[in-house]
Image (cartoon, rainbow, N blue to C red):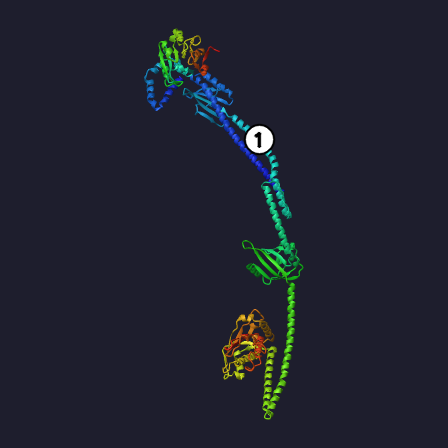
Amino acid sequence: MVTWLHGLGSTRSTVLSSRSVVRGLFLLASLIILPAPAAAQSVPKEYQLRAVMLWRFAQFTEWPASAFESPESPLIIGVLGENPFGDAVRVAVKGETAHGRRIEVKYFRRFQNAVTGCHVLYISHSESGRLTDILAAIDRKPILTVSDIEGFAREGRGIVRFLPEQSRVAIRINVEAARAAHLVLDSRLLRLAEVVPSQ
Amino acid sequence: MASQQSIQSRIRAIILLISVVVLLASFSAFIVYETISFKWQMRRHLSTVAAVVADNSAAPLVFHNKQTAEEILAALKAEPDINRAVLYDTDGTVFATFPANLSLQIIPPKPGIPGVRFSRQALDLFQPIYQEGKPLGTLYLHSSISALYVRLWRYTLIAALILGASVAGAAILAAVLQRRISRPIVALTDTAQRVTRTEDYSVRAPRLSSDEIGLLADAFNTMMAKTQEHQTRLAEQARLLDLSFDAIFVLDKDRKIIYWNHGATEMYGFSRQEALGNSSDELLQTIFPEPKENVLKQFYRNNRWIGELEQTRKDGSKLIVISRWALDRDAHGKHAATLETNNDITERKQAQRTLEQTVADRTAKLRETIGELEAFSYSISHDMRAPLRAMAAYANAIREDAGPQLPKGALDYIQNIVSSATRMDQLITDVLAYSRVSRDQRTFERIDVAQLVQEVVSHFPELQPGKADIEIQTPIPRVIGDRASLGQCLSNLLINAVKFVAPGVKPRVRVRAEPAKETQISVQPASSAAAHLTQNCGDKADPASVDSGTSAAPVATQAPAFIRIWFEDNGIGIAQADIHRIFGMFERVHPREKFEGTGIGLAIVKKAVERMGGRVGVESEPGKGSRFWLELRSAR
C-alpha cells in the first residue's frame, strides 16, 4: 500500500517537468475517470502488494545480457493465465524502471507464447495443472518465475513463491532453480526470503 | 655581575621563549590538523557505514520487512560510536530504529536535509536511500563524537608532556649554549669596566669568537689602542704644559677650574686637587683693575683679555700677575672654556717702582744742581756788568775829555770799545732775562693779552705807529700766565717781527687769537710742565687760579682749554731748514752785520711760555712772512 502510494507520489513528481504536465494530467484523469481504480479496489490487498513486488523482484535480479535484444529493450513482466491483479501490475510499473529498462506488462493465455516473450513470469493458480509442462517449456531460459502455487519453489523448478500470509509479504526462493535459469539474485532479496534448498 | 646575569638570562629566556612558541605553534597546528582530519575521517567512516546500511536497507524497505530492517540496523552495534539509527520510509515515517526499542522522543520526527553535520555532542547523518533512481526512504545515523574529545584530550596531554620535556631540554641546552655567545660579551664587558675603573688603556679584550662579537672585540681593541695613543699624547702635552713657568688653567663656562697646571700650583700654592672645581676668582681672591662685570663684558666681546690682576696665594701673600685670557667657543658659538695664562710680575712691578723712585730722586738732585748752576751763572753775569760799565764809562770819559787831542784812529778805537761794551751789556741783560724766566718764581694771573700788547708797543720806539703797523684783532680771550714773563715774550716776538723785514718795507704785524686744538695739547711733550703748572698754582693759592675753578682741579684727564695767539708779520720769513732751531739758545739765522741781535730772544720766549704751561711754534716761508704762535691756558 505504502509503496503503491509512493508510486502515485512519483507520478505526481513528474508533473513538475513541463513536458510531462499534459501526460501527468492525463494519467490523473485516467485514475479518476477510468474504472481501473474501482477494479483495483476490488482486487484483494494481498494481490495489490504482490503486483508491486513483481517489478521490484526485477530490480533485485540480474539477467544475462542475452536475455535482451538490445540495451534499450524493455523488461517484460508477463502474467500467465487468469489475472488476479486486475490492473494493479500495470499501474504499479507505470514510470518505473529496472536496470534502467522500461517495464512492460503482458498477459498470456497460452504458455507457449509466454515462455519466449518475458523476463518475469507470474504463473497464476489457473495454470496449476499445466505447471510441469510450463516449467519444462521454460527449461533453462532466463525467466524469473513467480507463483502462488503450493510447492512451486520447494518441489518444482519454480524460483519464487509468494507464501500465503496476511498483509505481510513472505517469499520462498529456490536458488538452484535461479542458478539454472542463469539469473543472479541480489543477496538483499535472499535475506528477506526463505531460501531452498537450505544449506 | 649584573650585566653578565642580564645577557645570560636574556639569551636563555629568548631560547626558551622560542622553543615554547615553536612547540605551541606546532602542537596547535598538529591538533587543528588532527581534529580536521579526524572529523573528516569520522565523517567518511559514517558515510561509508551509512552507504552500506542504506544499501542493505533497500530490500527491507521495498518489501516492507521491518524485522529484517531492524536486524540490519542491529548490526550497527559493532560501531560503538553509532548509538542511534532510524530508517524512514518515503513518507518520512519511522520504519525501523536502532536500538529497536528507541524512544521516538529523542529521534528527529522527520528526515532532515541529506548530509553529515557535526553538532557539539554528535555527528548526525541523513542518507536518502534510492532504488533505480527512485527514493525509497532515508537513513538517519547519530554518532557520538566523544572519541574526538578523548583524542583531543589525549593529544593535549601528550603535547603538555612533550612541551614540558622540551622546555626542560631547551633550558639545559640554553644554559650550555648561551655561554658561547655570552662569554665573549661578558669578557668584553669586564674589560671595558676594568678600563673605566682603572683608567688603564693598555688593557686588551680577549678575542673568544670569530663572529660579530669577535669583530667587536677587535674594534674595541683598536679603539683602546687609539685611546691609549691619544692618552699618551695628551699626557705628553699636559706634561709640557706643566713645564711652563706660567700658571695655566682652564675654566668652564661658570668660571670653575677644570685644568690646573704645575706652574699654577707653584705660583699659587694650591695643588691640582685643591684647585679643581673651585671658582678661580674666589680661590685666588682676584682683584680686577675695573669691575669684574666690565672685564667679562670686554672678554666675551673680544674673545680675549689682557690685564693686570692682584691675587692671593694659598699662604696669604699677594702677587701681581699679567693675565691673558682666551675664550674657547663651542660649535654653536657658546662660551665653552676660558684658557687663562698668568705671569707673575710682582718682582718686575717692584723693580719698576724702585726705578721710578730712583729716577725721581736723581731728577730732584739734578734740578738742584741746575739751580745752583743757574744761580752761579746769574751772579757771574751780574758781576760782569760792573767792569763793563766801568769800561764804557771810562771810554766815554776819554772821548769827551780828550777827544779833540786824540788822533782820528784813536777815537774809532774808543768808539769800538764803547759799542762792544754796550753789546756785551745787552748780551748779559738777555742772559739774565733768560735765566730769570728759568729761575724766578712766577705769579700766575689772568692777563688781558690785548692790553699787554698795547703796553709793550708803547714802550718801544721801533713799534710806534710811525715805524710799524701793529694790528690787534680783538677780542683776545684772557689767559693765565706771569705778567712779566708774558710781557717779555710779547716784546721779543714783536721786536723780532718788525726787525726782520726787507730793506724799505714798512713792518706790519697782526696779533689775533683762536682756541687751540685739543689734540695738539695732548700729544705735546710739555704735559709734565702743565702738571707742574697746576701744582704751582695750587701751592701759591693764587686768587686768579682759584677763581678759574676747573683749572685747579688735579684731574689729568680733563685737559685745560688753551688759547693760541698768532703774530703774523710781513718779514723776510725763515728758511724751512732753520725753523727747528730758531728757538735754541744763541741760534742766529742771519749774520749779525745784517740784523742785530743776541740770539737769545726766541729762546727766552720758549722757556717762558713752557714755564707757563704753554707752547710756542712758527709757520714760515722765505719772503712770505712768518707766523709765530704761542699757546697759553685760557682764563675761562
Disc 1: which chain? Answer: B
**Vertical placement of residue B351 versus B128, above or below:** below
Residue ID at (65%, 69%): B357
Q: Is residue A132 visible?
A: yes
**Vertical placement of residue B370 versus A112, above or below:** below
Instruction: Name the residue furthest bottom.
Output: B405
Instruction: Name the residue furthest top.
Output: A129
* Frontmost residue, A167 versus B35: B35
Label 1 crowd bin: few (<14), some (14–19), many (20+), radius 10 Å: some
Quarter of the rendering containing residue B169 = top right
The residue carrying mark 1 is B162
* Frontmost residue, B321 versus B555: B321
Q: Is residue A92 visible?
A: no
Image quarter in which the N terminus of chain B is found = top right
* Frontmost residue, B369 versus A192: B369
Quarter of the rendering containing residue B616 = bottom right
Q: Position of residue B181 (x, y in %)?
A: 60, 39
The tally of labels here is 1
Residue kind at label 1, given as amino acid type: Ile
**Vertical placement of residue B202 versus A94, above or below:** below
SS type, badge 1: helix
* Frontmost residue, B426 versus A24: B426
Q: Position of residue B460 (x, y in %)?
A: 54, 83
Q: Position of residue B449 (x, y in %)?
A: 53, 78
**Vertical placement of residue A48 versus B487, above or below:** above
Residue ID at (52%, 73%): B516
Quarter of the rendering containing residue B582 = bottom right
Q: Position of residue B385 (x, y in %)?
A: 62, 84
